[in-house]
Image (cartoon, grey):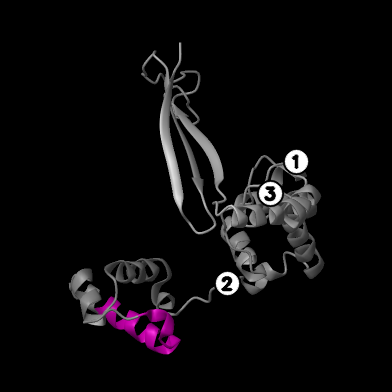
Amino acid sequence: MEKEDFRTVDDTIRSSYRKKAIALIKKGVKKGEVANLFGVNKNTVSDWWKNYEISGNSGYKSKKKGVKSEDKKLLSIAQEKAIQLMIIDKMPDQLKLDYGLWTRKAVKELVEREFGVILAINTMGDYLRKWGFTPQKPKKKAYEQCPKKVQKWLDEEYPAIQKRAKLEDAEIQWADETGVRNNCQHGRSYAPKGKTPTKMSMSKRFSVNMISSFTNQGKVKFMIYSENMN
């Protein structure tokens, strides 16, 4: 039987399915067979059984998702807006928090520090979803970059480079260089407190470098080379 997306099924039907599934499990039917019968994942049936064991017959009912009404009262509208503005305008370290990026835990600590309100980590996640915040990989921007100079280069110098390239039938290459060394170690390893772990590695150092460039049309050129290090 094709598995069904329960998010699209009416709550009454979902509750009925759960009740029938629990009854079959009580009769000795295996959870995998019940899952196939109702067209759902085996883990879903296991969750139904766990909810029944914890909540009894009330475990049949669907639980509402999102921020609970009692949780909504924990932060006022003004407090919610204040937290949102802080997250948008600053990074955690700029607000003297021990985090590099905004996570649920970081926002939770910000709320507690600013307003003395303690939220569960899952509740904090509900608030973030309600605000329209999603986890994203941040863009990198150099502190040294001067936006005005960059824009001036784009508006004045780069058009001249484009014009010259066209006259000389040349390509504009955007180049960068990167390298890897065998003695570079950025990671961490768990170990008992006071007993620093030892990582075996070669005493001889070496590196591999690559210089590459690409054009606006997507043409890529690269070269790999190494340097002997004493």
Give above or below for 90 relative to 58: above
Give above or below for 213 relative to 62: above
Outermost front residue: 167
Q: In the picture provided, is 208 more to the left or to the right than 127?
A: left
In the image, the segment drawn in magenta is 5-23
Residue 226 % position (x, y)? 42, 25
Which structural element holds mark 2?
loop
Find residue 48 and report its image quarter.
bottom left
Name which residue lies at 61% across and 50% down: 105
Name which residue lies at 33% across and 70% down: 44
Name which residue lies at 36% across and 67% down: 47
**Disc 3 residue type?**
Glu
Q: Residues within 10 Å of mark 2 (few under 14, many from 20)?
A: some
Instruction: Examine the rendering and report whether any part of residue 117 can be seen.
Output: no
> Total of numbered circles in the picture?
3
Residue 11 inside the magenta-drawn segment: yes
Q: Nearer the viewer, mark 3 or mark 1?
A: 1
Q: How far is disc 2 from disc 1 in space, using C-alphas?
A: 30 Å
Sequence order check, earlier mark of 2 and 1: 2
Identify residue for label 1: 96
- Is label 3 in contact with label 2 (beta carbons under 8 Å)? no
Identify residue for label 3: 109
Q: Nearer the viewer, residue 68 or 136?
A: 136
Q: How far is disc 3 from disc 1 in space, using C-alphas?
A: 11 Å
Q: Quadrant of the C terminus?
A: top left
Q: Nearer the viewer, residue 202 or 173?
A: 173
Q: How far is disc 3 from disc 2 in space, using C-alphas?
A: 20 Å
Q: In the picture provided, is 28 more to the left or to the right than 67?
A: left
Q: Residues within 10 Å of mark 1 (few under 14, many from 20)?
A: few
Which structural element holds mark 1?
loop
Residue 151 % position (x, y)? 76, 54
Residue 74 % position (x, y)? 72, 64
